Image: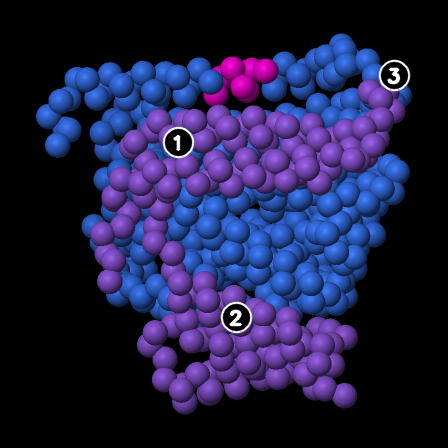
Chain colours: A purple, B blue
Amino acid sequence: MMQETGQMRAGLFDRVVGGIVLVLFGIAMLAIGWDYPMGRVNQMGPGFVPLSIGVIICLLSVAIFWIDLRDETISSAPALDWRGLIFVSAAILVFAGLVEFAGLLPSMFLAVVVSKLADRTNRPLGILVYAGLATLAGWLLFLVVLELPIPAFWR
Amino acid sequence: MLEQFLLGLGVVMQPEVLVYAFAGVFIGQVIGVLPGIGAITAISLLLPVTFHLDATTSIIMLAGIYYGSQYGGSIASILLNLPGTPSSVVTCLEGYPLARSGRAGMALFTAALSSFLGGMIGVAIVVLAAIPMTTIALKFGAPEYTMLVVLGLMAASMVGTGSHLRALAMVLVGVALGLVGADATTGYYRYVAMPELADGISLVSLAMGLFGVSEVIRNAAARAQSKVQPQIRMRDIFPSRSEARTLPGPILRGAGIGSFFGALPGTGAAIASFMAYAVEKRFSRVPKRFGTGHLPGLAAPESSNNAAAQTGFIPTLTLGVPGDAVMALMIGALILNGIIPGPRLMVDQPTLFWGVIASFFVGNIILLLINIPLIRLWVLMLRVPYQKLYPVIVIMICVGVYSHRTSVIDVVLTLVFGILGYLMKNYRFEPAPVLLGFVLGPLLEDNFRRAMLIYRGDFTIFVTRPICTVLFTCTVLLIAFSIYSSISQRRRMAAAATDGPASTP
């Protein structure tokens, strides 16, 4: 287990990655928006604002990159919480993938089960009971009280 | 003015509206108490729900969640040293030491009372400012709106803690995300990577991702902390007479600072509470006592964030320009209900406008009444571990986003923004300015292009028109002040580093 994060000084990658991603964002913005009509100052086209914003983002991100590169006092980024990241992402994708085919209740049930796996302390029976109760509560809230127009099960 | 306020009071006192006002402040109090769910998450969750209500009731409920959460946030700060909301971070500094020394009850009482007084002063300022502000707002043309939005975006990046450059970059990323979809003037598709994005990125998706999903990812796998609950005895909740005498000053100053930062577009309750604490400490005769459970240091920020939570509605309701990320969601809720916020709102929808304002008055009284007497309930709620809560938050986010536009792509995008928000924060980029830029961006572009069209590309109008001159001066002063303060801070740090060589290992 890595426990010595937080107070550690950031490595070179940790320091500059934010600035680099931001530069790439700005460049992508310029590249995609390059062909948008610019228009004239008194009759601006749809490309004027996107390209201006893209240029400013690029300039700012170069400045951020430069400042971060020289600042050695930055403490390193906290370690990624892979467990949370993977299971919460999977739960949302399960919901997104199932809701149109399987209906609201099955997709809610499975999303709860998958997201519950992020927590280390769970036992299978506990997860199923919890997911059942959460689905019941979801059914009451979303379909009975709020009457959302989403089918409960597949048709 | 009083007449209109009474009209609003009449709206709120209808039983059905009152129920939703109560529900709003109660939910706000609860999510404020629970660390890990903020007002932004709760409001975006309930945004789709409000389609089924009329606009007035929706806004009254959503607003109640916002200012209610400001009350609740202080409870977790005082008892557990865990801020329930961003604006109660400074409440920990004085509140927790008080609780440790066995005076939790008194700290909670002082916080609730300061919150109430600050909130009420904020409401009074909203009532007083509403008509004059609307009169000024009716004079706003495209150049004025452009400059106001620029001021707001600058204030969002220049005031507060953290790197100003980073915040400004995040504001612009938000503006960039707001560009996705059909251009409002020409209908030209910009950055539409897939057909589902033709209507643009959904506000609900962005807000729930950046604030909801990212927090769930961050906390889901974290080990449960052992929470030590301080004992609260109801007998000793009242401050002594000599302690009570030290409170009116901080509460009034806090409310003043809060009202200013609340009404200034781009800044909100969190910044207001930091500022109030800093001012109180700077001008105190006993600065050494701050951090050890000094009551004025608890009262000032609590009063400040609640005043700001109310005055934040001034630019939102009179100009249609949201002050912070939460207000951006309020504007979203109004637009989803088919109401365009702006200077015409007070004239065209007087019952909505004054009903919402009167609901603040009623809501603050309800909050004071449910805060202290139900303290045992809130303490009980603090015992709910996050592990029992987060899967429910996940499905509420999923269903909320999906039902908003019945779009699976929106749910997937929410996840993308969630991962983005999680990573951003790890690398010291704050997500709140992104949301503000996202909402203000289209306003900026629309008004800027219209101003240029009307005044034939003459940039001087942004300085020479009277209201523009004021807004421009404010923007310049703000930038100058923030550059000055960051330079002087760096000098002080450099001086401290050379003075104390013993501190370097």
Q: Looking at the image, which residue is at 25% across and 43% down? A: A8
Name the residue carrying label 2. Answer: A90
Marks 1/2 same chain: yes
Q: Quadrant of residue B179?
A: top right
Instruction: Give the secondary structure at mark 3.
Output: loop
User: Marks 3 and 2: CB-CB under 8 Å?
Assistant: no
Q: Which residue is mark 3?
A: B456
Residue neighbourhood size for the residue with mark 2, other residues' Cα within 10 Å, grouped as few (<14), some (14–19), many (≥20) = some
Residue B481 magenta-drawn?
yes
Find residue A75 and report its image quarter: top left
For the view shown, which residue lies furthest in the left direction?
B502
Label 1: few (<14), some (14–19) or many (≥20) C-alpha neighbours in 10 Å: some
Q: Height in image: B487 above or below B207?
A: above
Question: Viewer-proximal residue, B209 or B52?
Answer: B209
Earlier in the chain: of badge 1 and badge 2, it is 1
B274 displayed left or right of A151: left
User: CA separation, marks 3 and 2?
Assistant: 53 Å
Is residue B71 in view from this perspective?
no
**For the point 61% across and 44% down, which residue is it?**
B435
Residue wearing tag 1? A68
Distance between mark 1 and mark 2 Cα atoms? 33 Å
**Side of B370 relative to B49 (left or right):** left
Q: Residue at x 71, y 81 (%)?
A: A101
Task: Say whether residue B292 is left or right of residue A25.
Answer: left
> Which residues make up the magenta segment?
B476-482
Question: Element type at marker 2?
Answer: helix
